[in-house]
Image (cartoon, rainbow, N blue to C red):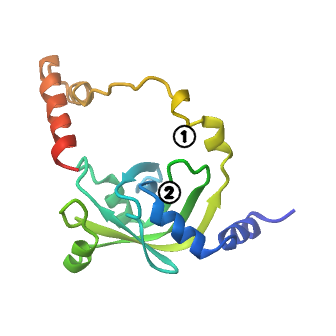
Amino acid sequence: MRSRREERERDSTTGSRQQAQAFLARSPLAFIATVDPGGQPMVSPKGDVPGFLQVEDDRTVLLPERHGNKLVYTLRNILDNGRVAITAVVPGTGETLRIEGAAELDDDPALCARHGARGRDALLLTRIRVHRCYFHCAKSILRSDVWIPGSWPDPIAISFGREIAANRGLPECDVDSFDAGVRERYRTDL
């Protein structure tokens, strides 16, 4: 039986860089995991046009930061310790691409302009020095039927107004205006 270290080293060298790069060029969605100063992990979705995760070189990936919820937990965690893991997804594909590495933030204006989208420069970029990169098998995706629309449950309407009101102790009468604001930002602030 191999040690965990041997397994990790084997996993990180499995497959071709070209296959991973082709996968990233088609991926419109990824999930980035970071760790806060207390050791608590967190995961944040990142979505954009396919190929938004850019390969800078054989060991470096760039993730542009877009307008979001302005909570910046992921960015704070990167500044604190830089440890990240990413799972990239391509719709209709069962396999996912896993990337683990060390991240740093870069706000170079020329780089942010080069990685803009929808007429807006990137706010900044997360540069990930890749330590491990490998494909994860399709079994969990296949079991979930996530790419089969007929298997999907009915959508759930999420009210951020209710979340905000409950968390801040605000009156229920503010819920509708909060929800209207969220819907407006979905329309105008992607």
Side of 20 relative to 8 (left or right): left
Instruction: Identify whether 60 is placed above or below 43.
Output: below
Residue 156 coordinates in the image, percent (x, y): 38, 25
Residue 88: numbered disc:
2
The structure residue drawn at horizontal position 57% and vertical position 51%, both measured from the top left corner, is: 93
Callout 2 secondary element: strand
Inspect the image, locate mark 1, and give the three-letter code of the amino acid beneath it: Trp
The structure residue drawn at horizontal position 28% and vertical position 70%, both measured from the top left corner, is: 115
Residues at marks 1 and 2, CA–CA distance in whole angstroms: 15 Å
The structure residue drawn at horizontal position 37% and vertical position 63%, both measured from the top left corner, is: 52
Name the one closer to the observer, 169 or 1.
1
Q: Nearer the viewer, mark 1 or mark 2?
A: 1
Name the one closer to the observer, 135 or 167.
135
Instruction: Identify whether 142 is placed above or below 28.
Output: above
Inspect the image, locate mark 2, and give the three-letter code of the amino acid beneath it: Ala
Residue 176 coordinates in the image, percent (x, y): 15, 23
**Residue highlighted by disc 1:** 147
Residue 105: numbered disc:
none
